Amino acid sequence: MTDPRKLSFPRLAVQPRETTRHVLRNGIVVHLLEDHTLPVVNLGLLVRAGTVHDPADRAGLGSMTSTAMRLGGSRLLPGDALDEELDHLGASLDPGMDDESFHLFGWSLARHLPRMAEIMASLLREPAFPPDKVELTRLHELEMIQRRWDTPQQVASLMYRRAVYGLENPWGRLGNAAQAKAVTREEMIALHRSFCRPGAMILAAAGDFDSSALLETLNGALGDWSPGPAEPAPVPDIGGALPPGVYLVPREIGQANLRIGHLSIRQGDPDHFALKLMDMVLGNGTFNSRLFRDIRTKRGLAYSIWSRVNPRPMVPGTFTIGGETKYEALHEAIDAILGHIRALRATEATDAEVKLAKDQLDHGLAFEFQSSWEVAWRSARYEYDGLPANWLLHEREQVLAATKAGILAAAKTHLHPESLVVIAVGDPAKCRTTLEKFGAVREFPIPDTAA
Amino acid sequence: MTQGELTPELQAFADTVVERKLKNGLTVLLIPRQGLATVHFAMAFGVGAVDEPDGRTGIAHLYEHMAFKGTEAVGTKSWRKERPILRKLDEMDAAMLAEHARGARGDEKKLARLKAAFTRLEAQAEKLVEPNELDSVYARNGGQGLNAFTSQDGTCYIIALPSNRVALWTAMEGSRVRMPVLRQFYRERNVVIEELRIGDNNPYARLYHELEALAFTAHPYRVPVVGWKSDLERMTRQDLEDFFRSHYRPDRAVIAAVGAIGKDTFRLIEREFSGWRAGTPPPRPVVTVEPEQQGERRGVVHMQANPALGEAWPCPTWGHADKAALDALASILGNGNSSRLHTGLVKQRQIAVATGAFTEFPGERYPNLLTAIVWPRHPHTPAECETAVTEEINRLVKDGVPERELEKAVNMLEAQRFGQLQDNTWMAAELASAQASLGDWRTRLRWVGELRALTSADIVRVAGVYLVPRRRSVMTILPGEAAAAAPVSTAPVRSAGPVLPEHPDA
């Protein structure tokens, strides 16, 4: 038998797949990639918007507006008829609002593409917001507020965000029932009118179509929509992060859930590349990251254990470590995690660690192009984020050029063991005493869902 | 089109699949895709949680974890030095188990002595380990998505590689099935117990596990894939080696490769796998048949979460004449925003926030469950939702199903078929698993033709026969304090629920 460790292979020459970029008559940017492997098409749209632009007393307006667009349908195709037709086509069309964008994803068999373009256009241009579906949206939102805390992992993630950004900060706040009840149909209509404009739209499509025919279809469906200014409301920079320290979120569950971290870099930070490499060494990638190898493989303390450096475009992003462990091992797990953070600031990573991370990135280049939809969506995403079209290759080159000295320097600059927020979700009777060994423990209960 | 034929679009896809078989019984499926510089591998085994003996539940999934620990070559500094230590650890573990088994009569001091010696020896073994080397060999070659899944029906291992590294995959996987070494076992067992706890505390996973435990009394589908915690705590390395030897065999294995398939792909597979032989006679198949249910079953779980409702009715699986009609019935009831349950409970009555219905739970190798799931909207109760589900079913039986509604359900199932083939790795996993567990990768492609042949009368008939209260199991999650004792164990193998807004970790 061949020993797999002894095999070596030449570098694979990879031919990048690229979208073609087009502009519709009214300025809507379109990225297209034909792929005739299967008779299906993926669509995606980005519009300049985001839940962080919601007014201070209306957290939830953006996401409720996008839900109401879908539930209410358009003037020509009301919600129930829209549901019926999409199901009959076996297709999907889902708008949504996240922190920093409005998006709409569509999927269908290729033969339905012309109709999908019509439906998408009517939903974007003339959503009806009928009062009964606005109310259904509200009921849905209220239930989701209620169910937000059903899983320990989501409790940990949401409470961590609230702590590191601040309870009222646009990136940390959560809509509550009172705000969801206060949102009006008129506010939804006004919000839709303000952001959903051709001047701020980028569309991506990949799949089994002819590009010129699709462009004609899109120009027919969207091209006569008069462009208009689309400037989302400014986001107040209000800060409000909770002080660093240990926060206990009481919950009677069978193991503790952890999030440990602090705010970190913005997109475009010159240390982005070194931090990305550091993140791979620490806990974002293979079974051989430090956290996985130590806390899962060697000590057997956790099923999931990971790190993420997540830069954001408008405000500082986050550096986070997450995982879960049994109460008896909580001290050992937190101690080990803190040790790994300190170690990154104290000593250079080993040559072997850096080489493994770089090799995986380098030789994995072919995977960046294996899905036509991922290629098309990435192109749209880069343009939306203001990144150059060649960002993928540029970023890889820069990460591959980063050194262990660079990692150490970036860790010293960007990791702050004294400023960590530790969120532990668990049974106070089983973890409070342990947590106190890491500092004063503040109780941090989930907010009253009825509030 | 007649029953069993493929639709033209699916036929076009099926024509791209090349099927080969080695003399040892190993099936190989090659699916070339143009324009790719990657190959996506799946290796599926027709062995899942259903094949576990009592007292060893969770062993299929635990073995899957252990299969990442390497081989006699990969993952060790010296197999020659490591082997006797692993054997000694097993002996000490057996001695500790025996002492445990004595219960209150056990010798505490002896146990403590054994444990201390065990810990010392384990540390010695650890020094010989090259940790996660299987992963690092793949990673340094650009491998992506190294993973595996265990279900009730089967186990599937996946990885994708740059197209010029097929020989790496065949060498690694060929040795992984022929000379695996189950090192670091006692730690990995703890990792799996943490995985079990994740499922225990997640209502969306918990509902499914409680429902299967309620609906099955005899068939192994009653046990969650992750197994029972007490079984896991007493599992031995020898148990896993025995399980491997009898169940991981070429005649139960299928390799699927999707992507840049070259002229030498099959030759490389043949070179590394043709020497693989089954070590034992074929294992005994599952013989237990779930007895016909004679009355409704009900269960409740209290946990710190919002309410949920699951209802299930026994239904047949592949090879039965009613299979396609039941699949279409489930789709009419609970697939999409215009389905009966969503329309009735979410839009009209407004007593639920999300609904769903599907077949093939907890598996599809054996007769399974048509399952309906409802997430009630506060302050409405699971009981109200249950009544509404019953009304929807009764209305369907009484008033029938318009032909267009059936056509819609079938359109959705067919389109979803293509959706699932889009991802290269998933396609490999899906075809390999279908071949390994169901015996034919075309099963689900032909099924679309069977769906197209259905009439409305078929749907109404199966609804009237299968979805009757006498055959129903009803599981409810209610908020409230959990019992002080450890609750029933469940696994996070299947999680579905309302489409809760995603909050990726910031």
Image (cartoon, coloured by chain):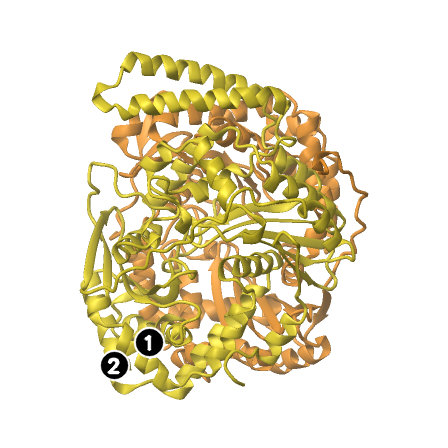
Chain colours: A orange, B yellow
Chain letter for mark 2: B
* Residue closest to the eye, A413 or B70: B70
Name the image quarter holding residue B39.
Answer: bottom right
Could you say which disc has been placed on residue A16 in the image?
none
Q: Is residue B173 above or below residue A299?
A: below
Q: Is residue A379 above or below residue B232?
A: below
Tell whether B446 sits left or right of B315. Answer: right
* Residue closest to the eye, B3 or A383: B3
Residue A144 can be seen, yes or no: yes
In percent of width and height, residue B454 lies at 43, 83
- Under circle 2, the secondary element is helix
Between marks 2 and 1 in the image, the one whose residue lies nearer the viewer: 2
Residue type, mark 2 in image = Arg
Contact (CB < 8 A) between labels 2 and 1?
A: yes
Could you say which disc has been placed on residue B395 in the image?
2
In percent of width and height, residue B474 lies at 23, 61
- Under circle 1, the secondary element is helix
In percent of width and height, residue B208 lies at 33, 55
Residue at the spot 55% in from the left edge and 42% down from the top edge: B279
Lower sequence index among marks 2 and 1: 1
* Residue closest to the eye, A177 or B144: B144
Chain letter for mark 1: B
- Quadrant occupied by the N terminus of chain A: top right
Residue type, mark 1 in image = Arg
**Mark 1 sits on what residue?**
B340
